[in-house]
Image (cartoon, rainbow, N blue to C red):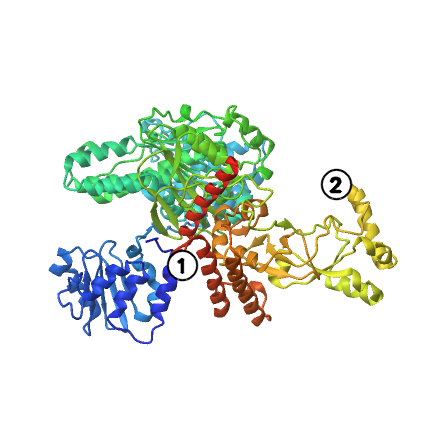
Amino acid sequence: MARLSVADIQDRVADLARRPTYSREFIFDLLVALGRSRASVTRLRSGNLNIADNPEVEVAQKGVVYFKPTDADLHLTIAELDSSPTVAKYDTRFLIATDYKNLVALDRASGETLDIAIDEVDEHFEFFLPWAGMEKAQYVAEAHADIKAAERLGKLFDELAKENSPEDISRHSLNLFFTRLLFCFFAEDTGIFTKGLFTEKVESLTQEDGSDLQSFLTQVFDALDTEDPAAKPALVRAFPYVNGQLFARGAEVVPHFSRQARNLLLRSGHLRWDEINPDIFGSMFQAVVDPKLRGDLGQHYTSVPNILKTIDPLFMEGLWEEFEAAQGKPARLNRLLDRIGSIKVFDPACGSGNFLVIAYKELRRLENEILKSLGGQNLQSELFGSRIKITNFYGIEIDPLAREVAVLSLWIAKHQMNQEFNEIFGIDIPLIPLKDAGQIVTGNAARIDWNQVCPNDGETEIYLVGNPPYSGSGKQTAEQKADYTFAFEGVAYSRNLDYIAIWFYKGARYIADTSAELAFVTTNSVTQGQHVALMFPMIFALGVEIGFAYTSFKWTNNARGNAGVTVAVIGLRSESTRPKHLNTDGVRRIVPNINPYLASGPNIVVGPKRGEPLSPTIPRMTYGNKPVDGGNLLLSLRDKEQLLLQYPEAVEFVRKITGSQEYINGQERWCLWITPNQVESALLIPGIAERVEKTRLKRLASRDAGARKLAERPWMFREQREGTAIIVPSVSSERREYVPIGYLGPDTVISNLAFAIYDAEPWVFALVTSRMHMAWLRAVGGKLKTDFRYSNTLVYNTFPVPNLTAAQKETLTQRALRVLDVREYHSEKTLAELYDPDLMPGNLRLAHKELDDAVDTLYRKSGFASDEDRLALLFDLYVQKTSAKESA
């Protein structure tokens, strides 16, 4: 049986929640709604599979559920069931107690509980998704970052930049000074220094006007770079030796201070720096030194949950599974310690080190759990530090400042994890003097040989992670465009590739035929539209596959002004028989293969763009009419009214015109529409003649030869297509279940901002508005952010359509007309309102469902359980049809 989609399950459970009363049948219907086999549920209902202690009242199935109706306390009932011999014997996962008004449930696998009114079960159906074979993904909640620190330091930076000319101190030196300042603030609040040491010394030992602060801070920094306490002036002898080159002499990095700058420094020092989350430490610092970044700090770091979407499925989940399997086996636990101590993590676009910091901390936490499981063994060998060395964390970063901050962030993360180690085991591992640093280099990752940064011998466990720069082909700098030559090293590539394709290609080449794997956060555009054909064939040709993926999701975090970017996560590895995981809307599925559209299916590439439909069954789709007029042939409502008020005879040359947004939102626009046999009479009207002449001059002035040619007929659009037509919006909100496609009569002109199928029969409307076609659009079409971006050459012309009989076309025609009729019932509403998923009328939804059912049966008599199921068949059919055309 095909697996249900989450939407299908939600609809089924919604029907269950609307019942006026409940009985023992509730559990059977809930199991069916979640996709359990009807045959299995029938056997359970008949008693054949019921292993409950009281089968006349209770329902229990081995490994699945124990359902107990009761008038007793529901929480107490769950506790009794959880400790019952029957539940233990049959390893029952879900326990449910209900009085048919309220319901309490326990998932014994995850430990999650549910306490709801029974008629709210549809709002909490995700709790039971494991019955449908879909485990709920769990992610760590993100800690809040103290953005006040960045704002306060930003003011200090501005004040110092004002007080010090570039001749006094370079921008690089000022940046380095702030790196040192951040370390001192953090150190005095986290036990690296004596509590409050730095701020108290500044406050008590320097003048209020700031005149001697430059000299004092220079002494402090020198003391932090001096190993022998006796060699330090008494004034700063309390400052310990740090090492690690952070405070190395040789550069004059301390600026001159004013009274205001000193006050700002002290105010910054009094913040609680132990509450600063080093996961965003680097990005916060970049916002300090770059005023342009301060207003939207949230856009400049990857939140912890998003980072975990790369490192968890890439390697941490497997390590935790190994840890669970090694419980009670010291030798195996020790081998796991050795293994995690040798893992290398490499971010070839590391920025300020966020991914490296989180990966380091996650490995340290696993190490702590292993040591706890060993019962204190091996602790003596850990006295001098963790097996997780920050020298095993590699990065490439083009910005020298970001590179410095990345190293600093790793040190801070190391100190935090040393503190966690101390809290657990009572053993202090001091951070200073610093003994190691991350292997992070400054350079252009597009041009550097990654093996020179992090050598890959083919056997070492190396994981590439990160959030490489995006930059579409039209937004790249000249230097970025030049990077492609270095990155592809003679391999042919398209100039339309996104900049991030460099990282995917170099990453695939780096991991090919080795134990290394990678996972990158990426703009979702690389898995949509024409970009799929440009990038993925090169990757697959290297023997590399997609091991896991997260389909498109909004990039959000808890910072102020968080970003609205839409991204995906793609994990690559050498071809393997290991399971592949596809994550969509918080649900993980094991699939046979993940194709470049991040769907379950073969590694096909839809394209290149086709000039004619793949299936001769359907007619041709074209763009609408493009004016190329400088706005002179187009009329607003006011323009139209003024023209007709002054020249009533112009009415025969004025028509309504609509594009995607006008059609969907019910907006009115107008245009001059003059056919060849009307030119003479139209130009007798001065108001029209004036606009036509302006169009002619505009076209003549164009740099485009085609536009200049059009000046010979300035009275008409570049195209002049008219007649009854199906209009297909070129852009539509991704919230809609259906793109609002419609029929327009010959009195309305379709602009080039929409597509048109002229003289099409209603059965064609049924095909393109169906859920089947929507599944194809979602997979192979491009997007603007997450909005659907329709393409006649990439979506419509590639859409596989079976040969249709006259009877099938008639059925589709009737279903199409029904949808159009129902729309007329609601003619007071715009299509945007009608197709809002929260407002869609029930009779319109039903009409679409009946249309969907009719289209589905064209492809499979038994229909489909989910869009994923539809898509799998469409990909297979596409392969068949393209293969047939190639061999013809």
Q: Position of residue 460 (x, y in %)?
A: 31, 28
Q: Secondary structure at mark 2?
A: helix
Of mark 2 and mark 1, the one earlier in the sequence is 1
Determine which residue is flagged by label 2.
706
Confirm or deny contact between disc 2 and disc 1 (CB under 8 A): no
Rendered position, 144 above or below 472: below
Residue receiving disc 1: 7
Query: The residue under label 1 is which amino acid type?
Result: Ala
Say if residue 834 shows up in the picture. no
Residue 790 in the image: x percent, y percent?
A: 56, 50
Give whichever of 402, 501 is nearer the camera.
501
| Residue drawn 33% across the image and 71% down it | 119
Say whether residue 393 is visible: yes
Judged from the image, the secondary structure of the residue bearing numbered disc 1 is helix
In percent of width and height, residue 879 lies at 46, 41
Q: Position of 255 compared to 276: left or right? A: right
Q: In the picture provided, is 588 more to the left or to the right than 743?
A: left
Give the residue type that dot 2 points to.
Gly
Viewer-proximal residue among 289 and 494: 494
Residue 564 picture location, percent across and down:
50, 51
Q: Quadrant of residue 434?
A: top left
Residue shown at the point (56%, 72%) measured from the top left:
825
Q: Residue furthest bottom?
A: 20
Q: Residues within 10 Å of mark 2 (few under 14, many from 20)?
A: few
Q: How many marks?
A: 2
Quote the CA–CA distance across marks 2 and 1. Answer: 48 Å
Q: Name, please, the residue furthest toward the left.
A: 85
Q: Nearer the viewer, residue 452 or 286?
A: 452
Residue 855's disc is none
Q: Crowding near pointer 1: few (<14 within 10 Å), some, many (20+)?
A: few
